[in-house]
Amino acid sequence: MVIFALILTLLLTACAEQAVNEPVPEPDVTDETPKETAAAKYVPAPVSSDSLYVKKAEGIGDDFIMGMDASSVIALEASGVKYYAFDGEEQDVFRILADNGITHIRVRIWNDPYDENGNGYGGGNNDIDKCVEIGKRATKYGMKLIADFHYSDFWADPAKQFVPKAWQGMSVEQKADALYAYTVESLTKLRDAGVDVGMVAVGNETNQYFCGEKSWLKITLLMKSGCRAVREVFPDALIALHFANPENNSYPAYAEKLKEYEVDYDVFGSSYYPYWHGTLDNLSAELAEVGKTYGKKTMIMETSWAYTAEDTDFSGNTIGEGSLVTKNYPYTVQAQANCVRDVINCAASTETCIGVCYWEGTWISVGTESWEENHEKWEKFGSGWASSYAAGYDPNDAGKYYGGCAVDNQAFFDAHGHALESLKVWALAKTGNEIAPQPDAIEDVNLMIDLAGEVELPETVNAVMTDDSKEAIPVVWDIDDNKIAEMKSGGVKKYDITGRAGDFTAHAYVSMVEYNYLRNWSFEEGEEAWTATNLAATEQLYVEDKQTDSMSGSKHYHFWSAGKDTVEFRLEQTVTDLRPGAYSFDISVMGGDCGETEIYAYAVTSGGEVRSELIPISGYGNWNSGNTGTFEVTDGSVTVGIYVRCSGEGNGAWGKIDDALLNSSK
Ligand code: CA
């Protein structure tokens, strides 16, 4: 079928002007390879949209890479997934991508993603044969392949760089030889199949950790093996090295090491997920510095944004409803396009940056009926992020949390495979499509109202427009006097008040609270009013601006220390001029790697000190609070705070403190 479609495409392309339905000759099944790829170059038609706003991205050159990672397509198709073009017709997904401006298809490659019984680990079961299959289809539609070697049998990322099973126990020299041989063998398969390979990545998100090694000497020895193999088999392809976490500002240091150890590569690549990786300005600065100082090309190798908050395959998503990430854009089709446009614009305006690749824009639900049905497909075809068979190789992550797709809401196709308007952003970013802006989403309203005060909601809400600007529009809240009376008498409680704003539903999340006598209770004003006393050798003690790590607002108080038994401090605030009476104090903390801990909230008055129960530390995102219970203030003054002592383990004790509440106790 592939051959048949290829020849049909060639004919249609070559004979487009004749408009004659010539009989299609029987394909020659012995010759699977399109030998003359240049002559068969697929030329997509121009793209237009009357609903998608696209601000023109400046400085996109003719060779700019518009990439799409489509690694899981084969496993998805085996699971029954079909893709539909904008005309509603079923279509080869690679043609749909080419038709909408995609120039490169990226595919991850795992050495041996199978258990001893031949069951696939999942994530597409992407070995080199899968890559060849996808590469041939990409080539057919005029796109180049970005081959992404993880040099692992399953997922590789900054935290995880498992050695392939076959290489376990090898010395680093033996591993370097094996890596070279494997790379030559794999790339030769791609070459023999006629795949148009534009770029080869040696490693995936290798932040000073690669194929089981953590020293630069060993990492670069392995990287050099891979790079040598690429130069030999595909001398015209670009060699990329791929890193993550630009927000740590470590890229120039990485590039310096690569230079020091004389690694021969062309492209310094970075992942950029807006909800994890800092600002685009910071990314641009990091890439520009590496590009300029070390004479390298740079590229954004992975990015994505969600078109909906909804999960459609019964397997939780990375971002969406309830996720704890910074929400840079709304979760809409238009906002997905805006996010991609902004990333493209960043790349195009960063000297040395040659393109952007989206991550898994084709990974959609294998079914929307039930978890059971989907689970069967994930296990059988490897179309979920991990199957249960991966447990032997990756017991602590895949072994525990195997399941479906975590990015089905970040694809460019809906749950049933229909192309979303946002896919056109790749083609339209070059020219722009700056049509009249319309409201696209409504920003949530978050309010804290004192139980003793008035319940007043704003008369307007912010509409996020299709061009990503904001406009205040009138809102009518669904609230009456009965509801207000209920809220005022209901004690400390949160309410979701809905309203109508134009064609949209607006949400006001109202927290009814007791009056908080503390100043700067959520650290939004930095250290203001707080005093920290370092009682040991805690290395980091400061207010951090990071919404995802904050309980309220965007800031919190951060602590970290690498050494064992070095974390011990107090953080406290003294309040004066209080009316005599009963009060209570409450404060929250989260953290990890803390080892043995002694953490409690306290209040010191002229009558002495009261303490909360010990506050446990239970990992990222798990806030635990300590409450002192009631104490009496007689002279108007109290000092409240938190005491923290951790033994520390692993990478050092870390934690976040937020939301300090000093309330009167009735
Ligand atoms: Ca999902």
Image (spheres, grey):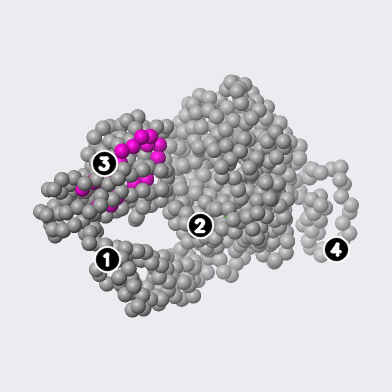
In terms of secondary structure, where does tag 4 sit?
loop
Give neighbour class at mark 1: few <14, some 14-19, many 20+ (Cα, 10 Å): some
Give neighbour class at mark 4: few <14, some 14-19, many 20+ (Cα, 10 Å): few
Of badges 1 and 2, nearer the viewer stands: 1
Q: Of the residues shown, which amino acid type is indicated by label 2? A: Gly
Of badges 4 and 2, nearer the viewer stands: 2
Residue 643 is labelled as 3
Q: Which quarter of the rendering shows the C terminus? A: bottom left
Instruction: Identify residue for label 4.
Output: 21
* Nearer to me, 38 or 616: 616
- Which residue: 32% across, 63% down? 492
The stretch of residues the image draws in magenta is: 585-603
Tell me how far mark 1 sits from mark 2, CA to CA: 30 Å
- Which residue: 63% across, 55% down? 371
Does the segment drawn in magenta span residue 412? no
Tell me how far mark 3 sits from mark 2, CA to CA: 35 Å
Of badges 3 and 2, nearer the viewer stands: 3
Tell me how far mark 4 sits from mark 2, CA to CA: 48 Å
Label located before the other in sequence (1 or 2): 2
From the viewer's perspective, tell me whether residue 20 is left or right of residue 603: right
Residue labelled 2 has its Cβ within 8 Å of some atom of ligand 1? no
* Nearer to me, 132 or 525: 525
Instruction: Identify residue for label 2.
Output: 320
Residue 450 is labelled as 1
Q: Of the residues shown, which amino acid type is indicated by label 1? A: Asp
Label located before the other in sequence (1 or 3): 1
| Residue 572, x across and y down, in percent | 22, 46
| Residue 624, x across and y down, in percent | 36, 48
Q: Of the residues shown, which amino acid type is indicated by label 3? A: Tyr
